[in-house]
Image: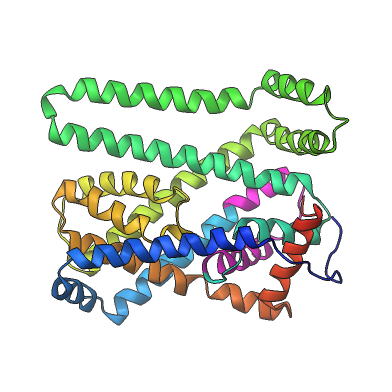
Amino acid sequence: MKDTASDEPTAVPAGRRSRNWLGWGLAVAIIATLLLFLDPRELLEAFRRLSAAEILLLLALITLDRILMGVKWGVLLRIAGVELSYARIVAIYYQGSFVGVLMPSHIGGDLLRAWLVARESGIRYPVFASLVMERLVGFLSAINWALLGAVLLTIWFDPQRWPLWAGLGLLAAVAGNGLFALSLHPRTHDLVLAGLGRWNRLRVVGILEKFYEAYARFSRDPARLLLNFLLTLLEHFLQMGIVFAIAIAIDVTASPVMFFAATAVYLLIFRIPVAPDGWGVGEVTAIGVFALIGISAENAFAMSVTGHALVLLGVLPGLLFFLLHRQRPAEVVAQVEASEERGTAV
């Protein structure tokens, strides 16, 4: 990986920055619209129920979740041949989270953390390929949890036909997990690489071929890949637990099983990249999904906003890790943006 620390950053296309600000504008517009229809007194009452001790406990859970995110990515980086310590990988994950959540840059925190690891390890394509695998496994985990939640909610509303809903949910889970397993099969890799090989004289196709070769190596270590999947399932369950803890803190009452079922569906929709960090989309989704189990719009909105605010606080250690390595976040972002413009980021 070329070290771009001494390179002069180049200008980022205005279109990309415009899309970034458009996302934030959409988030603000959604939240402002929701506030027009919510009872401000009920909202304030919900926020007032949060005590300092509860906030500290929630921040501790969010910290545990962030560490688990870094560790499970570290498992994939081990497959990629990266030998950085897990402590350093977690620190880099925090740096990426800090930039992705708090800085108005068009680059994502994912790109930044991969760039930092690639720069320190000297490994390029496998590191960036680990981001793709991480996202695919994360999406698969979220789908599995959401299918389980949807089946439980459907059975709750229509208990007489529970075998039908359970069977459909199982069929969907088998299909989704089966397609993912098929995508990891060596024959699938051979077919894709053969197709890319025919056109690799083109620079873009050549880059894609190298990237896919790096991606294919993850299926050669099924033990670690399975470990990553299990850690991802655990991490998503922890996220559901955090939402449940927020609900308890603001005195929301609901059946724990049904709450976790609704939360699994909520978190899947919440991950759709419409607005930055899910602002606005998360609040709308929370109101719609949690209404199914009898939670008021005000409480659902308060839960989502509280979660967002706590995440903002939870990623602040990322700034500390920048300072410990004598880096300025804005300068590092500028270096990544410059590398991305020149095509050297991957």
| Residue 82 within the magenta-colored segment of the rendering | yes
For the point 63% across and 40% down, the residue is: 224
Which residue is painted at 57% across and 69% down in the image? 104
Residue 107, located in which quarter of the rendered image? bottom right
| Outermost residue, left side | 160
**Whole-percent x and y of residue 315?**
52, 70
**Residue located 80% across and 38% down the image:** 204
Prevailing secondary structure class for the magenta stretch in the rendered image: helix
The magenta stretch is: 72-101
Residue 89, percent across and down? Answer: 66, 61
Task: Report how many numbered discs are placed on residues in the image.
Answer: 0
Q: At 78% from the left edge and 26% from the top edge, which residue is drawn?
A: 196
Write down the quadrant of residue 46 in the picture: bottom left
Which corner quadrant of the image does residue 157 belong to?
A: top left
Is 120 in front, or is 336?
A: 336
Q: Is residue 212 above or below residue 120?
A: above
In front here: 96 or 68? 96
Q: Is residue 188 above or below residue 242?
A: above
User: Is 71 placed left or right of 57 in the picture?
Assistant: right
Query: Is any part of residue 304 visible from this angle?
Result: yes
Q: Is residue 296 magenta?
A: no
